[in-house]
Image (cartoon, rainbow, N blue to C red):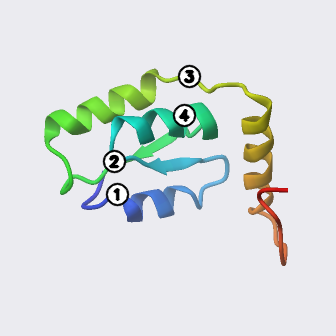
Amino acid sequence: MGGSGNGEQIAANKVKGIRAALVWNLDTAKLARQHNDANVVAVGARQHSQEEVLELITAFVGEPFSQDERHIRRIGKIGITNKPVRFFNLYA
């Protein structure tokens, strides 16, 4: 948790195996888990009350990954970006 949550998300995503998501409402908290199997949540402390932060974290932690094949493929493609490549098409 930081002021905006952006720096924490960026730093966390540099660690191998981490898929950090910046969340700002219940939908983004749930979708981060459902679609991207995010395993770290970043929240902006200046953007939310303590009650809202706890609500966002609870929603994030409680939401399962969808196991949908398209989401599994997307996560695989995201992993490609950790290797040195010149170009990739995330939507191919």
Q: Are marks 3 and 4 in contact (CB under 8 Å)?
A: yes
Q: Which residue is mark 3?
A: 64
Crowd tier of the residue under label 1, counting other residues whose Cα lies within 10 Å: few below 14, some 14–19, many 20 or above: many
Name the residue at 49% across, 42% down.
40
Tell me the kind of residue under disc 1: Gly
Q: First in sequence, mark 1 or 4: give its number.
A: 1
Kind of residue at disc 2? Trp
Q: Residue 10: image x %, image y %?
A: 49, 63
Sequence-wise, which precedes: disc 2 or disc 1?
1
Query: Are the residues tagged 2 and 1 within 8 Å (C-beta)?
Result: yes
Mark 2, secondary structure of its residue:
loop
Counting residues from the start of the chain, the first of labels 4 and 2 encountered is 2
Disc 1: which residue: 5
Quadrant in the picture for residue 52: top left
Dividing the picture into quadrants, the one containing residue 91 is: bottom right
Residue 24 - label: 2
